Amino acid sequence: MLSPRNRELLGLLPSALLVIAGFTAIFLQAKADTSGAEAAHAANLLLAHASTASLLYGAIFLALCIAGHVVIRYALPHADPYMFPLAAVLASVGIVMIYRIEPTLARQQAQWLVVGLLVFAATILFLRKHGLGVLERYRYTIMAVAIVATVLPRLPVIGGEVNGAYLDIHVGPVSFQPAEMAKIALVVFLASYLADNRQMLVTAGRKVLGMTFPPMKQFGPMVVVWGASMATLVLTSELGTSIMFYGAFLALLYVATGRISFPLVGLGLFLLGGWFLATHVGHVEARIEAWEHPLNQKLYEVRGGSFQLAQGLFAQADGGLLGTGFGRSLLRATPHSNPILPVAESDMIYAVITDELGLVGAAGLLCVYLLFIWRGLKTAMLARDSFSKLLAVGLSFMIAMQVFVIVGGVTRVIPLTGVTLPLVAYGGSSVVMNFVLLALLLVVSDRARRPYQRDG
């Protein structure tokens, strides 16, 4: 029977095979698109070189994954053996799809993947030495730094507006989305605070209309910190992340207390706040209107209207059940024309996947996410202390909410927002911080799965 670490090592092979198969399919499609004798001869030479390149890309990807596996084997020998391979599968799909969209962006994504693995290893080694307790001790500092960072995109010089939202900060050639860091900081703070005060929140409080509400002394600081983080996100018009944070907040509150009154009241406040933003904030109002009427000609033609959403719906319909095949979706009419599917490498990468791999491929991708979330929640069930349990639940739910927000937006279940698809969509800060999230889950898993040590 294979040990957990050997199962993890074996589980990395499918991700490398996906890279090899994906790049081979893209190169074959490029050859099929050529015509004429000279073009065909050049395509044959390119294909001979490309087959070697596909194997090389797959080998490099596998080597990077094995490097991460070695760190886990050394530092976290009892950690869950499936989460890292599942993350590798998602990253492999992302690299292949981004290369198909724009090779230059794929090279940048690969560089960020290396950075993400380095930060992943550093996080594991740091927490192995200092323990998860360091996060609990500095929870207010962590949250304060995250809140300040989310405001930075509003500042001149280093910040700027993109499609009505303030997302990135720019330092020289490097850009970063602080909201990616804030999502982990918020979960750390809420998990730590609720672990210390959950008993008081459950046993004390007043009853109103049959529902028990906690005392403000314990509940107030958490609401203030959460409210400050939400206010900064509304200030930057990054509403997708705000929805994600709000969902994680309610989920952790319910898991910590077991009281249904908290999420019910929270849902009511969300509906009230959503109505206010939709009727008083122009950016949000435009998103809602585009969501309600994506095929309206006036909205379709206006800048910032429903064009992106409508094109995404057309692309998904074009894919059908089995898809059109790698490289077959039409993203640009000509190499230098405006994109038919705007921001295909980021906001709309799920639409490209559905177009080229069909409903089957898109469902397979969502199943990988579900498996990852399931392993995270199982880790929470095995954890032996309140902070670890709540941390694992919060991080797993954050991934679930992020996938729901972007996939729901692209499929028109909810209004479209600019959240990235974790480990698949293009974005350096998203890749790096999702590897930090993975490292935290693995650290919790290692602690939860260690054999009990008897004293004496």
Image (cartoon, helix red, strand yellow):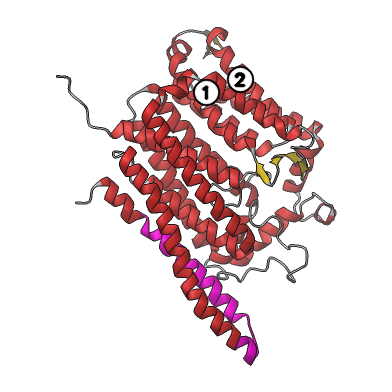
Choose the circle earlier in sequence order: 1 or 2: 1
Above or below 293: residue 277: above
The quarter of the displayed image where residue 121 is located: top left
Res 453 label: none
Residue 358 in percent (x, y) is at 54, 64
Whether residues under marks 1 and 2 lie with C-beta atoms below 8 angstroms apart, the answer is: yes
Q: Is residue 64 above or below residue 418?
A: below
Q: Nearer the viewer, residue 153 or 380?
A: 153
What residue is drawn where x is 35% and y is 32%? 381
Q: Residue furthest front?
A: 172
Is residue 133 depicted above or below 159 in this figure? above
Span of residues in magenta: 12-40
What residue sits right under mark 1 in the picture? Answer: 189
| Residue extending farthest left | 456
Residue ID for mark 2: 225
Q: Amino acid at mark 1?
A: Phe
Give coordinates of residue 452: x percent, y percent.
22, 27
Tell me which secondary structure the magenta stretch mostly adopts: helix
Give how far across and how far down residue 227 sits, in percent.
64, 22
Q: Is residue 420 visible?
A: yes
Judge from the rendering whether residue 119 lies leftward or rightward of residue 165; answer left or right: left
The residue that appears at 49% across and 38% down in the rendered structure is 436
**Which residue occupies 48% across, 64% down?**
57
C-alpha distance separating marks 1 and 2: 9 Å
The residue sitting at 23% across, 47% down in the picture is: 3
Tell whether position 239 is magenta. Answer: no
Q: Secondary structure at mark 2?
A: helix
